Image: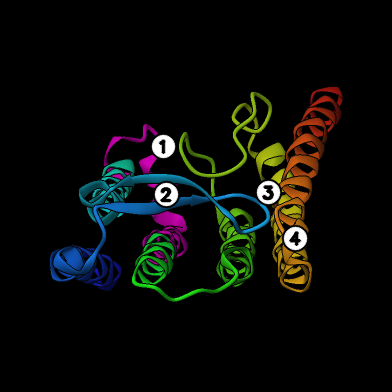
Amino acid sequence: MRRSKIIAIAIILLSFALAFYFCPLMPEKMASHWNVQGEIDGYTSKWWGLFLMPIISLGMFLFFILIPKIDPLKENIKKFRKYFDGFMVLIIFFLFYIYLLSVFWNLGLRFDMSRFMMPTLGLLFYYCGILVKNAKRNWFIGIRTPWTLSNDKVWEKTHKMGGKLFKVAGLLVLVGIFFPKCALFFVLIPIFLIVIYLIVYSYLEYQKETKT
């Protein structure tokens, strides 16, 4: 078994173990959602509050395991498999980290939820840049526009550009740590602009390739 799978399974099992352990200690209604200002604006039952994230993590893990088996271009996934596996572990760890923040909050600890989330979001975006840069053409991972999926050169150019932009986005997210009240904008605005830019970029590169 791959080391990445072992790590992911260990994190998921730990999250389920924590859910059972903390069940008697939690209130019947748990805070489950925080707004941009870090204020609670959503509650859920104790069961869902403790077990939903571990279940989601398990579902994500199974989906990641399935992708290399069902993708018609599975041979291309093998070419960047170590980056794919690293992304799987990072996603599972990210969900586990968010889960811990929620558990600690409901145990009575108080902190700025937005500020505590920013470092892991920055890390996630930065690694997305690494993954995107190395991704080969496939149907599940990467910048999948009609033009990147139709041409290997367009895929490569778009993903090299996307790799740089996602790394920059990751660094910008870290800046949001110092502006917790508007931290969400350091996440949404860069990602929105990057997505729009890369769609247009892939189209223009495709036009160049077809003319050539």
Residue that mark 1 sits on: 73
Residue that mark 4 sits on: 181
Q: Amino acid type of disc 2?
A: Ile
The one nearer the camera, 174 or 149, is 174
Task: Mark 4 and mark 3 in contact? Answer it, CB < 8 Å.
Answer: no
Residue that mark 2 sits on: 77
Splitting the image into 4 quarters, where does residue 103 fall? bottom left
Closer to us: mark 4 or mark 3? 4
Q: Amino acid type of disc 1?
A: Leu
Picture coordinates of residue 78, whole percent (x, y): 38, 54
Label 4, label 3: how many angstroms apart (C-alpha)?
Answer: 32 Å
| Residue 87 falls within the magenta-colored stretch | yes
Instruction: Give whichever of discs 1 and 3 has the lower sequence position.
Output: 1
The answer to whether one can see residue 164 in this image is no
Residue that mark 3 sits on: 159
Label 4, label 2: how many angstroms apart (C-alpha)?
Answer: 40 Å
